[in-house]
Amino acid sequence: QVQLVESGGGLVQTGGALRLACAASGRAFSGYARGWFRQAPGNERVFVAAISWRGTYKLYEDSVKGRFTISRDSAKNTVYLQMNSLNPADTALYYCARKKDGGLPGVAPAGYDYWGQGTQVTVSS
């Protein structure tokens, strides 16, 4: 069964940090870029960060640059999102996803096919 499972979410105070993980099962994830997206209540799902299959190309949404770091461990088929200096605007359900084709990662949710169930991140003020 091919699936993505996110973990690491939780409740943290402003200025705190969390590390999200996205574990993949199945060979269908080998060779594909992966991305993180987030969705706050009443809002659309938006891009956060993405990483190429080999980890050499990384893309970040402007508001998280310098605070979030995406990385991957190909041996474990897992992608991580280290989130530092969190603030209430980062509160959302965070999803990871696999890019549809074997190219570089993009920012559009429509470019991704397999999605996890999400992990909740809540930042208190």
Image (spheres, rainbow, N blue to C red):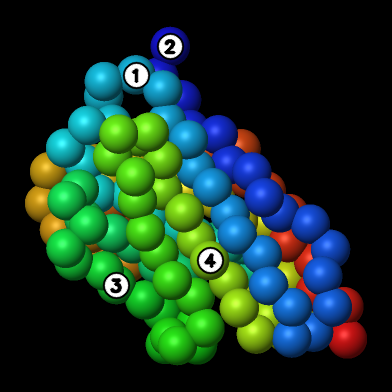
Q: Nearer the viewer, residue 94 or 23?
A: 23
The tag earlier along the polypeptide, 2 or 3, is 2
Measured in 3D between alpha carbons, the distance from the residue under mark 2 to the one under mark 3, in whole angstroms, is 29 Å
Q: Amino acid at mark 2?
A: Gln
The tag earlier along the polypeptide, 1 or 3, is 1
Q: Nearer the viewer, residue 76 or 51?
A: 76
* Residue 89 visible in the current orientation: no
Q: Nearer the viewer, mark 4 or mark 1?
A: 4
Q: Residue at x 48, y 35 (%)?
A: 23
- The answer to the question of whether label 2 and label 1 lie on touching residues, with beta carbons closer than 8 A, is yes
- Residue for badge 2: 1
Mark 1 secondary-structure assignment: loop
The tag earlier along the polypeptide, 3 or 4, is 3
Residue 26's disc is 1
> Taking 42 as reference, is 114 above or below it?
above
Measured in 3D between alpha carbons, the distance from the residue under mark 4 to the one under mark 1, in whole angstroms, is 24 Å
- Image quadrant containing the C terminus: bottom right
Residue 59's disc is 3
- Residue for badge 4: 82
Q: Position of residue 60 (x, y in %)?
A: 36, 76
Q: Residue at x 55, y 34 (%)?
A: 5
Q: Quadrant of residue 69?
A: bottom left
